[in-house]
Image (cartoon, rainbow, N blue to C red):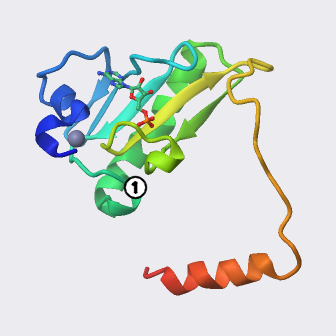
Amino acid sequence: MNVQCCIFCKIIAGQVPCTKIYENEHVLAFMDAGPVSEGHVLVVLKQHTTRLDLTDPLEMAELAKVLPKLAGSVKDAMVADGYNVLCNNGSSAGQVVEHMHFHIIPRKENDGVFNQWPSFQYPEGKADTIAEKIRRNLTL
Ligand code: AMP
Ligand code: ZN
């Protein structure tokens, strides 16, 4: 998907309508059109990137500046017990719109929205091996 046919770029450009929550020079927040709970909000950068790891850290910092207050306002407005902040990266992770975005999903106790967190235990030594692999790929 390129910028010309990106639905979120079209929303940012005002070519496709959205229910806007907040906008500044870098960021747009709007209601998700297919919410998983009432009050589900999307937060996007105006600069098109497909994934979090391909996003300029300085742009990401602009998103981070407003994310806490946006999350708090969603939680308070919906009288939610909590919320999930999600960023799906890649189709294997559930990403459908290839313009990097964060979901703010208000949650109530026992709402059943995400029922399963499929955790498991590493066999002895495997976490260390994987951590070493990740450290080798980290260029900060
Ligand atoms: P993801 O699976 O992380 O890529 O999530 C994409 C999200 O964008 C979904 O929750 C959709 O409901 C939402 N979405 C897609 N098109 C629109 C649109 N035109 N306006 C608002 N939300 C949208
Ligand atoms: Zn885009």
Q: Residue 17 appears in which quarter of the rendering?
A: top left
From the top left corner, tell me how far across and down residue 107 is, in percent. 67, 22
For residue 128, side relative to residue 90 (left or right) = right
Q: Which residue sits at x=12%, y=29%?
A: 13
Q: Quadrant of the N terminus?
A: top left
- Tally of numbered discs: 1
Horizontal relation, residue 67 to residue 97: left or right = right
The quadrant the C terminus occupies is: bottom left
Determine the residue positioned at 44% across, 46% down.
91
Instruction: Establish whether ligand 1 lies closer than 8 Å to the Cβ of label 1.
Output: no
Vertical order, 74 against 71 (above or below): above
Relative to 79, does residue 101 appear above or below in the rendering?
Answer: below
> Does residue 102 sit above or below 107 in this rendering?
below
Amino acid type at circle 1 is: Leu
Q: Quadrant of ligand 2?
A: top left
Residues packed near mark 1 inside 10 Å, few (<14), some (14 to 19) or many (20 plus)? some
Q: Looking at the image, which residue is at 51% across and 31% down? A: 104
Q: Quadrant of residue 101?
A: top left
Considering every residue shown, the one lying at the far front of the view is 92
Counting from the top left corner in percent of width and height, residue 95 is at: 44, 41
Give above or below for 128 relative to 65.
below
Image coords of residue 93 (percent x, y) = 52, 47
Q: Secondary structure at mark 1?
A: helix
Q: Which residue is mark 1?
A: 52
Quadrant position of residue 18: top left
Q: Residue at x 59, y 18 (%)?
A: 76
